[in-house]
Each structure stands twice: as C-alpha cells, then as structure tokens.
Image (spheres, rainbow, N blue to C red):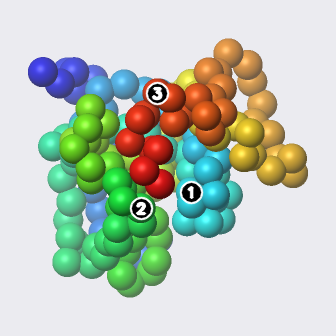
Amino acid sequence: MSAPVIETRQGGCLCGAVRFKAGLTKREFGVCHCEMCRRWTGSALLGMTVPEGNVTWTGAEHIASRQTSPWAMRAWCRECGSNLYFKVTAQSEWSGNVELPIGLFDDASGLTMTNEIYIDHKPDSYAYAGEGRKLMTRQDCIDKFSLLGTA
C-alpha cells in the first residue's frame, strides 16, 4: 500500500512542452553523485521520489526516454532537452517510482534534503550546506540496492 498524498505540486520542462502534476507522499529529496547522474544533469541529481501512479503528464508526446543501465532509464523533453525523470525499470522493491528533479517544480520551497548517495564520487569542487543528512558511499548503495551490482 502506498503512502497517502500530502500535497500536489506542478512543474515542467524549460520550454513548457511537458508539464506534470505530482502527488507527493513526502517533502524530502535526495542527491545522487554517481557518474551517470552527474553526466545526465551536469552536476548532481537532486531528485524527489514520487510513486509513478501519482504523476500525471501533459505533453507526453514530447517525452523521450532511454534505458541507461541494465536496471534504469532516464527521460527528457524532446523539444528543449530538460531532464524529466529517472526510473528503476528492473523488478525490485525500488520499481514503481520516478525520481523527479526538484528544479522542475514550479515551487520547490519547503523541501528538505535528507540524503546524499555516492558521496565518495562527489567532486571536491562543491558541497551542500547543512547537516543531518544520511551519507552513503557507492559500496553502501550496492549493499542496500542490490540491483546496482548489475551495473
């Protein structure tokens, strides 16, 4: 059973061709510093996990996607190139959700960064302020998310 929706937020790509409404089940987001996310975003992925069924898209005909590992895919707007979501495609306890970049939300205020993964892959050229986040190394992620061992 999925968690209850606590609020709905809207967002979209740079050009406006793709828009979404997301029913949030929490106001927390995480950061991924893995090489794939850094290449995909040009930095780190600041992403919020949302049950896939809680997201409705308009302009879906403008969404392109690609399987980027044996277990996950990424999607973007065909018109402007904005990154839209990351999704685990392999059957696992992590399936059924999408990671929405928080920069896509019309209003990302009131959200809290609670974890950073692949912290040992983060370049030393930047760091996020604040304390109290859970930090996980690549090996921590492999141990917790066993499907990563296939990448």
Q: CA distance from mark 1 to mark 2?
A: 12 Å
Residue 124 vs residue 91, the one in the foreground: 91
Is 100 on the left or on the right of 57, as rendered? right
Find disc 1 in the rendering and name its residue. Answer: 37
Q: Earlier in the sequence, mark 3 or mark 1?
A: 1
Element at badge 2?
Answer: strand
Residue 100 in view here: no
**Residue 35 sits in which quadrant?**
bottom right
* Residue with the mark numbered 3: 144
Where, by quadrant of the figure, is residue 133 drawn?
top right
Residue 39 lies in quadrant:
bottom right
Numbered mark located on residue 69 in the image: 2
Residue shown at the point (54%, 34%) measured from the top left: 141
Say which element carries label 1: helix
Q: Earlier in the sequence, mark 1 or mark 2?
A: 1
Label 3 close to label 1 by CB (< 8 Å): no
